[in-house]
Amino acid sequence: MDFNSILIGSEDPQRLVEYYTKVLGKPGYSDGGYTGWQLGSGFVTVGPHTEVKGKNAAPGRMIWNIESRDVAGEFERMKAAGAIVIAEPYSFEGAPNSSIATFADPDDNYFQLMSPMELPASG
């Protein structure tokens, strides 16, 4: 299997499109009310959803991640572009050379910028 994409449904998708365009850059596509950005081999797509109303009541329930070898630099770029900062870059236990930062979008959906994760060698 291969992970393909994540769809972020919103009552006001245009507000999220404007936000993610500032943070992620120009979208790769926009069609039928859906707008998406390719990040690596996957896509983040924003669009309308009839079952979504208002802001996310549980933003930590699902968090999507973006890998970067320069978390500090990307963090500053995203912050300067208007990203909503939840947590500035920090190292997490068990991975002192890694870094992670948490952001929110205007609907209170969380996403994180993090150092690439290395899978342990199987054996």
Image (cartoon, helix red, strand yellow):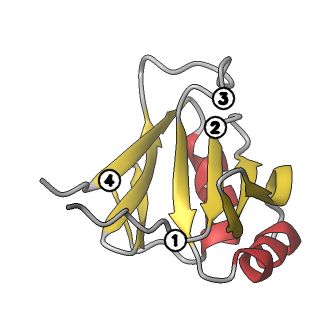
Q: Which mark is residue 5?
A: 4
| Disc 2 + disc 4, Cβ < 8 Å | no
Question: Mark 3 highlights which residue?
Answer: 59
Residue 3 screen position, x and y as percent? 25, 54
Question: Does any portion of residue 32 appear in the rendered image?
Answer: no
The amino acid pointed to by label 2 is: Asn
User: Quick one: label 3, few (<14), some, or many (20+) residues within 10 Å?
Assistant: some
- Residues at marks 4 and 1, CA–CA distance in whole angstroms: 18 Å
- Residues at marks 2 and 4, CA–CA distance in whole angstroms: 16 Å
- Residues at marks 2 and 3, CA–CA distance in whole angstroms: 5 Å
Q: Earlier in the sequence, mark 2 or mark 3?
A: 3
- Residues at marks 1 and 3, CA–CA distance in whole angstroms: 23 Å
| Disc 1 + disc 3, Cβ < 8 Å | no
User: Quick one: label 1, few (<14), some, or many (20+) residues within 10 Å?
Assistant: some
Question: Does any portion of residue 121 appear in the rendered image?
Answer: yes
The amino acid pointed to by label 3 is: Pro
Question: Mark 1 highlights which residue?
Answer: 116
Q: Which mark is residue 109?
A: 2
- Circle 4: element type: strand
The amino acid pointed to by label 1 is: Pro
- Circle 1: element type: loop
